[in-house]
Amino acid sequence: MPKSVLSLPVPRRALALASLLLPLLAGCAGRSTPVAKVGDEFVTEDQFKDAARGNEAQYVGSPDSAKTALLQDIVKRTILVQEAKRRHLLPDSTL
């Protein structure tokens, strides 16, 4: 029996929700296509490609597995940065 999206762990839930929302968001013109939404920020296709460039050796396996692992890492990093900003541990000018 398939799990509902809400019963998945947070990173997997974010990926599942992103995959459901991507077709709806793809029509946004004038900017890079969003691939995930973390809090109120979007991770764009351009950001995903920039993160992937030069990191091919870190993400091994099938292309789908590697892309999923990279997106999970980007989502985790974005969550950590957002929390650090919220706690005023990281000044905005650092990034």
Image (cartoon, rainbow, N blue to C red):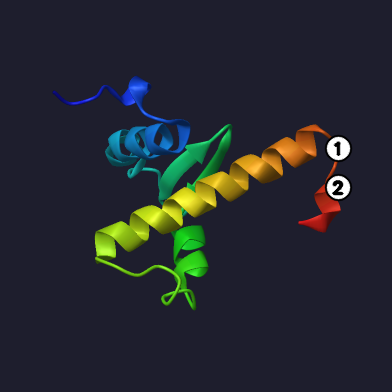
Is mark 1 in CB contact (under 8 Å) with mark 2?
yes
| Residue position for label 1 | 88
The local crowd at label 1, few if under 14, some if 14 to 19, many if 20 or more residues have their Cα within 10 Å, is few
Position of 24 with respect to 36 (left or right) is left
> Which quarter of the rendering shows the C terminus?
bottom right
Q: Amino acid at mark 2?
A: Pro
Q: Position of residue 4 (x, y in %)?
A: 27, 22
> Gap in Å between the C-alphas at discs 1 and 2?
7 Å
Secondary structure type for disc 2:
loop
Q: Which residue: 45% across, 49% down?
A: 72
Residue 91's disc is: 2
The answer to which quarter of the image holds residue 17 is top left
Percent across and percent down for residue 57 are 42, 77
Would you place residue 31 above or below residue 13 in this image? below
Tally of numbered discs: 2
The percent coordinates of residue 12 (x first, y second) are: 38, 37
Q: Secondary structure at mark 1?
A: loop
Q: What residue is at 36 percent from the left and 28 percent from the top?
A: 8
Q: Is residue 94 above or below residue 61?
A: above
Residue drawn 52% across and 46% down? 75
Q: Nearer the viewer, residue 44 or 11?
A: 11
Report the side of 63 relative to 48 (left or right).
left
